[in-house]
Image (spheres, rainbow, N blue to C red):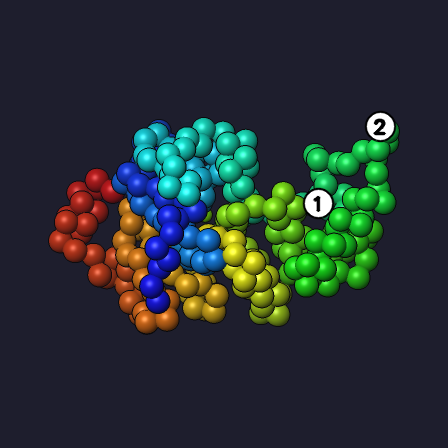
Amino acid sequence: MARPSAPPLLALSGVFKRFGAVQALRDVELEIHAGEVIALVGDNGAGKSTLVKVIAGVEPADTGTLEWQGRPIHIGRPHDAQHLGIATVYQDLALCDNLDVVGNLFLGRELTRIGVLDEVEMERRTRDLLATLSIRIPDVRRPVAALSGGQRQTVAISRALLGAPNLVMLDEPTAALGIEQTAQVLDLVERLRDRGLGVLLVSHNLGDVKAVADWVAVLRLGRNNGFFDVTTTSQEQIVSSITGASDNAVTRRAAREGEL
Ligand SMILES: Nc1ncnc2c1ncn2[C@@H]1O[C@H](COP(=O)(O)OP(=O)(O)O)[C@@H](O)[C@H]1O
Ligand SMILES: [Mg+2]
């Protein structure tokens, strides 16, 4: 599969991020185009969540170049990313159990009319959004605690989509889900791509990756360690890139000497 010739939605290069003694990201590059699902994979501690946080402006890069649709940009805080149209669903689901679906979607950005919460309009927009995404939740006025794990994850993703983003990042969205629920979330990821969004999907489930991603970017010990076309790459190739079985001499030596 060829990548589009238009400038990517987001391109980053030379990204470094350090936490105290830990060099979490080292000279990382990545391009995400509209209408693509890129899976970001790697072992625990490889730097996947850190990269998501860099792009989301939660943990800005120490150094590095970022471009949005071909123009240099700086993402120094979450507002910068939101302003560009980058939405993030974090690993630990941030939903309020006691609030209903409408309340969770509009938490922190409630609609008001003449100074009063406009429940009718918020509920209408919630139903519209869920319908557009073909998400079936029978009662949007039930506390989300009563929903299944898959439904909760789709609510968390819908919440991120309320601001009509161009790029959505999902950090391990299926980690806590069963097979059926995982399928619901992966279906939703496909619909996001069909709507022309760029999607960065962090996962360490290669089944999920094979099912929905177009490209796989591998991080190992905070560095890029491969970029593959999902349709033409075997699971074994991806695994060896994750575990380091396909490391070259330079990476092996650096890992041995504790540099990475
Ligand atoms: N806030 C933080 N403070 C200190 N170290 C961190 C912090 N966040 C991540 N790290 C470290 O950075 C490395 C990469 O972590 P992370 O990005 O969470 O990896 P992954 O998501 O691939 O499992 C790990 O060694 C982790 O311990
Ligand atoms: Mg992580």
Which image quadrant: the C terminus? top left
Residue 149 appears anywhere in the view: no
Q: Is mark 2 within 8 Å of ligand 1?
A: no
Q: Are marks 2 and 1 in contact (CB under 8 Å)?
A: no
Of residues 64 and 41, the one drawn nearer to the viewer in this rendering = 64
Q: What's the mark number on residue 51?
A: none
Residue at the image position 28 percent from the left and 60 percent from the top: 241
Circle nearer the N terminus (2, 1) = 1
User: What secondary structure is found at the residue carrying circle 1?
Assistant: helix
Locate residue 235, reporting x and y percent.
35, 70
Q: Amino acid at mark 1?
A: Leu
Residue shown at 55%/37% (left/top)?
A: 82
Q: Position of residue 17 (x, y in %)?
A: 35, 34
Counting from the top left corner in percent of width and height, residue 16 is at 31, 36
Q: Quadrant of residue 2?
A: bottom left
- Label 2 packing within 10 angstroms: few (<14), some (14-19), many (20+): few
Q: Quadrant of residue 243?
A: bottom left
Compared with 15, 6 (above or below) is: below
Q: Which residue is mark 1?
A: 105
Left/right of residue 115 with respect to residue 76 in the rendered view: right
Residue 79 position by quadrant: top right
Above or below, 5 relative to 47? below
Q: Residue at x 20, y 56 (%)?
A: 247
- Pointer 1 local density, CA inside 10 Å: few below 14, some 14–19, many at least 20: many
Left or right position of 90 against 100: left
Circle 2 residue = 115
